[in-house]
């Protein structure tokens, strides 16, 4: 029996590795049918991943499991390094180049006439998205772009950095999961094809935010278990500093601050540090004298894409003909506060629900957004999010508008591909929990 399970495990693992490698064959999306093949390879790779991790060989020694875990994690990322980066990458490069030339990216959009000479020296300028918008990333990210642009314009350096942060997140995640299932649990994140693609392949920098965010959670757990007052203060300060670092790179961890208040309780005042760090870094760009956050507010009015929830509301009770997303952000803030209050006694579980609620309600849902919650999903064993990470590869069909006539608007069949499998997974989870509770009720 064990031999058969091992055979199934390695067969699925080989299929996943082959699927990741195959993505390199379909990354030229200027060719009409390439996105379809890319999506097919990504979904096939994801299905193999779900099966492989579910068949994890728990009978291996801890050293054997560690070797298996890390070797596969490294190989998967090496396999996608040659991929063409996503279009966000050119924005990172451009804003670093702008800073090196002495311009403030929060004041000058890529199509600003003042940057004409720079555009002539930047051959990939035409690949920059939203060229009429100034920088929308927090100052920590912009400072990083400036430093990287000093070194090289080669996407490989960026990919290696983002992949290294991603692997470090996997290492930190091992500290959160109980030793008995440590490597099997962390593999749900470290081996996830969407995670592998987004950072090592697509060169999205979100891994630099996820790493300190997950590390902050580790220290919040340590804080909860500490008994010495000095140790509690130390863990609290480390946690809020890491959280502030994450916020300065991308604002998403702001959503976790209400739950952090419940986690830290009498030492919640230390969360001021989490806000002070991005505020201090903003000084490099002229804040508060210059309105460097205005561009982020303006970006909230951008036409949305691939939402999971609001399309149902709009087609029934709340029409939104202009497809604007700004009023939905208010709903997200209210939902985050309410969910945080609901889980004030269990902040660990609440963090998954807070991020999950935000992702379900977000009016723009790019695949790399899903990576924000996947470490928590691995920690809390929330498998429907893993299923969604696989079906989200269908998002890349947007790059084949000529074939599918999709003018950045999801048709019902495409929404079904993305949403229905995770919904089925949720029903299966509830069914399994109900069956597990039934014997306990019968014995009372």
Image: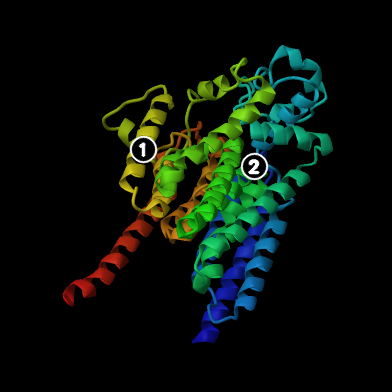
Is 123 displayed left or right of 440 in the figure?
A: right
**Image x and y of residue 431, in percent:** 29, 64
Q: Depth check: 91 or 291 in front?
A: 291
**Image x and y of residue 189, in percent:** 55, 58
The answer to whether residue 164 shows anywhere in this view is yes
Residue visible at 33% across and 43% down?
Answer: 341
- Which numbered dot is residue 92? none
The C terminus, quarter of image: bottom left
Residue visible at 51% across and 35% down?
Answer: 272
User: Disc 1 designates what residue?
Assistant: 337
Q: Depth check: 27 or 311 in front?
A: 311
Alpha carbon distance from label 1 to label 2: 27 Å
Q: Depth check: 361 or 165 in front?
A: 165
Quick check: 30 above or below 185?
A: above
Label 2 residue SS: loop
User: Disc 2 designates what residue?
Assistant: 205
Q: Residues within 10 Å of mark 2 (few under 14, many from 20)?
A: many
Quick check: 422 above or below 278?
A: below
């Amino acid at each position: 029996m064990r031999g058969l399970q091992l055979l199934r495990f390695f067969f699925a693992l080989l299929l996943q590795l082959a699927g990741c490698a195959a993505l390199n064959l379909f990354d030229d999306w200027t060719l009409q049918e390439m996105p379809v093949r890319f999506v097919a390879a990504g979904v096939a790779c994801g299905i193999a991943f779900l099966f492989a991790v579910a068949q994890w060989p728990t009978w291996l020694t801890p050293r054997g499991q560690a070797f298996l875990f890390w070797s596969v994690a490294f190989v998967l990322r090496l396999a996608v390094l040659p991929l063409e980066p996503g279009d966000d990458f050119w924005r990172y490069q451009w804003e670093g180049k702008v800073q090196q030339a002495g311009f403030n990216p929060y004041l000058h959009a890529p199509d600003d006439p003042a940057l004409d000479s720079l555009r002539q020296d930047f051959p990939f300028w035409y690949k920059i998205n939203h060229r009429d918008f100034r920088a929308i990333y927090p100052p920590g990210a912009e400072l990083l772009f400036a430093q990287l642009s000093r070194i090289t314009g080669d996407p490989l350096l960026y990919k290696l950095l983002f992949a290294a942060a991603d692997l470090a997140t996997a290492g930190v995640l091992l500290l959160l999961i109980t030793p008995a299932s440590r490597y099997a649990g962390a593999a749900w994140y470290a081996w996830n094809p969407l995670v592998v693609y987004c950072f090592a392949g697509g060169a999205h920098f979100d891994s630099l935010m996820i790493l300190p965010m997950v590390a902050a959670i580790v220290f919040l757990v340590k804080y909860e278990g500490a008994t010495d007052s000095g140790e509690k203060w130390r863990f609290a300060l480390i946690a809020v500093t890491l959280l502030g670092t994450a916020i300065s790179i991308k604002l998403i961890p702001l959503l976790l601050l209400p739950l952090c208040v419940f986690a830290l309780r009498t030492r919640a005042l230390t969360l001021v540090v989490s806000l002070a760090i991005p505020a201090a870094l903003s000084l490099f760009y002229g804040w508060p004298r210059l309105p460097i956050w205005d561009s982020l507010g303006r970006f909230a009015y951008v036409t949305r894409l691939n939402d999971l929830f609001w399309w149902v509301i709009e087609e029934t009770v709340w029409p939104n003909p202009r497809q604007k997303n700004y009023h939905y952000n208010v709903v997200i803030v209210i939902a985050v506060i309410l969910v945080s209050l609901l889980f004030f006694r269990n902040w660990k579980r609440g963090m998954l629900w807070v991020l999950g609620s935000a992702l379900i309600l977000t009016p723009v849902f790019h695949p790399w957004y899903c990576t924000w919650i996947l470490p928590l999903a691995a920690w809390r064993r929330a498998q429907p999010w893993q299923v969604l990470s696989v079906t989200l590869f269908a998002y890349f069909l947007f790059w084949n508008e000529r074939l599918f006539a999709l003018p950045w608007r999801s048709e019902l069949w495409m929404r079904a591909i993305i949403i229905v499998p995770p919904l089925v997974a949720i029903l299966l989870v509830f069914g399994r929990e109900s069956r597990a509770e039934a014997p306990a009720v019968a014995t009372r």
